[in-house]
Image (spheres, grey):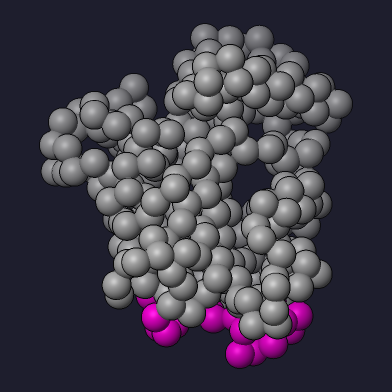
Amino acid sequence: MQCICCTSEKISSSDLALFGFDVCQNCGLVFNSKRGTQGRRNRIENHYQHIDPHEHVASSKRPFFKSAISQLPAPVDRDMKILDVGCGYGYFLKTAANRGWIVKGVEIVSDAARRSKELFGEQNIFHGLLKEANFPDDFFDAITMWDVLVFVDDPFEDLKECVRILKRGGKIGIRVRNVFFHRAIYRLYKTLKNIALRFGIKKPYVFHRYCFSPKSIYLLLTRAGFENIEITNSPLTAGDPYQHSKINGFVSLVKFFVYLTSRVIYVLSSRRWVVGPSLLIWADKPEGIQN
């Protein structure tokens, strides 16, 4: 078995082995190789249509969306196109459209895709997987994947597809959980679980099929063909949309403290240590790359 990020064969069981996870000893990727692709689409669709409070989540992510779009160059003409992979109900696409971008989206959840089509037009939203959309080469000026790469069948193949459909010099923005942070919180929660439950605090960690460290996502993007890779602590969502605690104000205060601490560590380490709960990554398609 090889790591998809660094191709190392130094794979071993992780401290999450109970849940089927392995870890790459070279780059820190934690992944679940035992979770097959069959039924994945149905599980995701069921989650986002019937379980996930998407409107509350979108509201909490609004400051992040505004911050993210401000880090992309403002469209200089009417033909600058952005693709949001996993566009959901179109919340980020609204932000991008208001900024002047021509927006397109890809979404596998049928209800979300239908809603986005109503907002942005049938021709601008593809219901299915990224590769199935079959976009032309060198088509988009920017691509975003907010909390999506952790769910796909093969992140390397999806990123190679992004390289193909991006224009030369085009930019990709990615947000994923930081596995180093969530493994640490997992260990702490296990130790203090009884006390946490007494105060109504649910598990604050998140693990998906692919759980990236800063090093693993850097190596994966490099392997796929991107350059100028910048990895920082992602701004956190506001409030407590998933109701991790009965005390919403407490969660907001903890999030503020965690983000502030991670920023201080990032600065004091000369931008080497990215320890926050989520990673925000920007990277470019090389100007001279040939598709």
Location of residue 273 with respect to 82 vertically, above or below: above
Which residue is at 25% across, 47% downward?
4
- Residue 59, x across and y down, in percent: 81, 52
Relative to 269, residue 131 above or below:
below
Spot the residue most to the right. 249
Residue 213 visible somewhere in the drawing: yes
Is 121 inside the magenta-drawn segment? yes
Q: Quadrant of residue 237?
A: top right
Q: 269 or 184, which is in the foreground? A: 269
Residue 162 can be seen in this image? no
Horizontally, is 82 left or right of 97 in the view?
Answer: left
Determine whether, in the image, residue 44 is placed left or right of residue 49.
left
Residue 235 in the image, given as x and y percentages of width and height: 68, 38
**Quadrant of the image containing the N terminus:** top left
Residue for point 76% across, 80% down? 119
Q: Residue at x 37, y 72 (%)?
A: 164
At which x and y percent is residue 160?
33, 64
Magenta range is 116-137
Report whether 63 appears left or right of 32: right
Of residues 264 and 85, which is closer to you in this image?
Answer: 264
